[in-house]
Image (cartoon, rainbow, N blue to C red):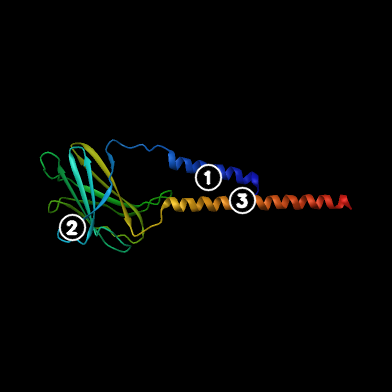
Amino acid sequence: MNSTRATPLLRAFVGALLVVTIAPSFVHAHHILGTPHYAYDEDYPQTPILTYRVNAGEYDVKMTGYPGKLEPGQRCSLHLYIHHKESGELLDVPVTMTVTQDRFLLEDPLVYGPMEARLDERIYKYHPHFEAEADYLITVRFEVDGAEWSIDLPLVVGEPKSPWMMLGAGAGGLMLMLLVGRAIAIKRSRTQRQRVLTPAQQ
């Protein structure tokens, strides 16, 4: 690899990195990102529970995950509870859940669903299974009063490496490769000049 080839490659990498990190994301009117919190069950105070609370128009959405801190290979229970803010009436419509593995820059593979559930004992029940230690994205979709809602809920299984760390390692590897390629090109150039100068000097 010479310096003329390395420069376009470096520019392409930097451009892709800027697009990923600073490009604005266009969010639909009824698309919500929920934030997870950890709580403890009243019956089992020693067991952490993953909880989400999100507002969807006139409705409050709450989801709980058991166990709260998942490990690879575990089957979990996700319970979804949706009720009207003022009347407290439970929403009784089909609610679809899908789970994808969040792979940052690569395509996100589907690992669960789409699974449709109906109201069962005042909640919607789902039972996904997670084989790999990774970051996941739970997407819940339902329609109410003619409006479609899509809620994204992040979920972490195990202790996966940060995608930013992996990206940094990849960038460091690329820079090292470019530096090595440039050093080799300079060394070859010097060797060729020495071969040209030697006969003339003799």
Name the front one of labels 3 and 1.
Answer: 3
**Residue 6 as seen in the image, left or right of residue 186:** left
Identify residue for label 1: 13
Q: Give me the C-alpha separation between circle 3 and circle 1.
A: 15 Å
Identify residue for label 3: 179
Q: Give me the C-alpha separation between circle 1 and circle 2.
A: 47 Å
x then y, percent, for residue 100: 33, 52
Quarter of the view holding residue 150: top left
Q: Give me the C-alpha separation between circle 2 and circle 3.
A: 55 Å
Which element carries disc 3, helix, strand or loop?
helix
Say which amino acid is labelled 2: Asp
The reply to whether callout 2 and callout 3 are in contact (CB within 8 Å) is no
Mark 3 vs 1, N-terminal side: 1
Query: Residue shown at 75%/50% (left/top)?
Result: 190
Mark 2 vs 3, N-terminal side: 2
Query: Of all residues shown, which one is farthest toward the bottom?
Result: 73
Which element carries disc 2, helix, strand or loop?
loop
Identify residue for label 2: 41
The one of 117 and 9 positioned closer to us in this rendering = 9
**Residue 110 as seen in the image, left or right of residue 201:** left
Count of marks, rendered view: 3
Q: In this view, does 134 lie above or below 62?
A: below
Circle 2 packing at 10 Å, graded few (<14), some (14-19), many (20+), is few
Mark 1 vs 2, N-terminal side: 1
Q: In this view, does 57 lie above or below 165?
A: above
Q: In this view, does 197 lie above or below 133?
A: above
Which element carries disc 1, helix, strand or loop?
helix
Query: Residue shown at 38%/57% (left/top)?
Result: 160
